[in-house]
Image (spheres, rainbow, N blue to C red):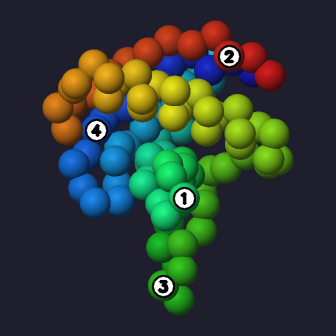
Amino acid sequence: MEITEITVTLRNEDKLKAFVNVTFENKFVVRGMKVIKGANGFFVSMPSRKMPDGSFRDIAHPINNEFREVIEQAILDEYYRVMEQGQQPGSSNDAEYDHEW
C-alpha cells in the first residue's frame, strides 16, 4: 500500500501540534489524525470518538505495530518538513509520498 498524500495543518497549542490527513493510493483518505507533543516526544494520534463513559476509541487505526510505525514515521517526517519551512499555524501543506509496505 502506498501513501500518496499527507496534508499537515499546523496548530499552535500546548500539546496539539497539527491535524493530519493521509491518502492511500489516491483511493482512500483518513482524516483527523493528530501530531501530539507528549512527555517523551512527538507521536501520532489516530482519529477517535468520545464514548459515553468519557473514554476515547480509535475509529480508524493500523492493525499491527509495523504498519503503525510506517504511518507515524511518514507523518512525523512531513510534520518536521513543514515546520522547517516555517509555515504558520492554521495553514496546510500537501505532500506526495511513495512509501510502500
Q: Which residue is mark 4?
A: 10
For disc 3, the neighbor class at 10 Å (few under 14, some 14 to 19, many from 20) is few
The kind of secondary structure element at disc 3 is loop
State which mark lies toward you, 1 or 4.
1
Residue 52 seen from this side: no
User: CA gap, disc 3 to disc 2?
Assistant: 36 Å
User: CA gap, disc 4 to disc 3?
Assistant: 26 Å
User: CA gap, disc 3 to disc 1?
Assistant: 25 Å
Q: First in sequence: mark 4 or mark 3?
A: 4
**Camera-nearest residue between 29 and 41:** 41
Which part of the image, by quadrant, shows the N terminus?
top right
Residue 93: x %, y % from top left:
32, 22
Residue 65: x %, y % from top left:
79, 47
Q: Residue at x 40, y 22 (%)?
A: 81
Q: Are marks 4 and 2 in contact (CB under 8 Å)?
A: no
Residue 24: x %, y % from top left:
62, 23
Q: First in sequence: mark 2 or mark 1?
A: 1
User: CA gap, disc 2 to disc 1?
Assistant: 26 Å
Q: Which residue is mark 2?
A: 99
Amino acid under label 2?
Answer: His
Q: First in sequence: mark 4 or mark 2?
A: 4
Q: Which residue is mark 3?
A: 54
Q: First in sequence: mark 1 or mark 4?
A: 4
**Camera-nearest residue between 18 and 33:** 18
Amino acid under label 1?
Answer: Asn
- Residue 40's disc is 1
User: CA gap, disc 1 to disc 4?
Assistant: 20 Å
User: CA gap, disc 4 to disc 2?
Assistant: 22 Å
The kind of secondary structure element at disc 4 is strand
Q: Is residue 18 above or below residue 57?
A: above
Q: Residue at x 54, y 58 (%)?
A: 40
